[in-house]
Image: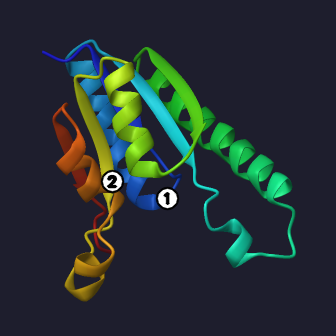
Amino acid sequence: MYSRILFPTDGSDCADAALDHAIEHARTYDATLVGLYVADVREVGYAAPALSLERVREALLESGEQVLGRVAERAREAGVEVETAVTEGTPASEIIRHADERDIDLVVMGTHGRSGIDRYLIGSVAERVVRGSDAPVLTVRQESS
């Protein structure tokens, strides 16, 4: 049913909770897990104007490699074949593009479960991916502590 499962991550606790589901689906279906980190550098100049955009970009890309290293390690420990990629851009658009270009059968991702006015004004990456992806999307909410 699934041969390639995309796991987009930002390294957050919510994404980490979704990783367990992604690995379990990959193991169940003997699928390849494709880890993706999207470095979003769009607003760096506004948020930190004193910092060099190139230095921030490099730091984000390095962070992505570290996050995906942990994803790959956990997948391999579970006996799951894994590929990883770091890209730059708008997260939802890049996730959808990556899913299309890599023939992804399922996207498994975390959601912060935004509610109220924030959700209506801003939306979420997960919501945009659900609406725009041709592949099915499984969203996983972080457990409350």
Q: Is mark 1 in CB contact (under 8 Å) with mark 2?
A: yes
User: Residue at image x 40%, y 18%?
Assistant: 80
Q: Which mark is residue 110?
A: 2
Q: Is residue 136 left or right of residue 78?
A: left
User: Residue at image x 35%, y 57%?
Assistant: 125
Q: Amino acid at mark 2?
A: Gly
In the rendered image, residue 69, in percent from the top left (x then y), is placed at 62, 33
Whether residue 21 is visible, yes or no, is: no
Up-down: is 81 above or below 141? Answer: above
Label 1 packing within 10 angstroms: few (<14), some (14-19), many (20+): few
Q: Amino acid at mark 1?
A: Ser
Up-down: is 100 above or below 50? Answer: above
Residue pointed to by mark 1: 12
Whether residue 27 is visible, yes or no, is: yes
Q: Is residue 117 left or right of residue 10?
A: left
User: Residue at image x 49%, y 32%?
Assistant: 74
In the rendered image, residue 77, in percent from the top left (x then y), is placed at 48, 23
Q: Is residue 48 left or right of residue 78?
A: right
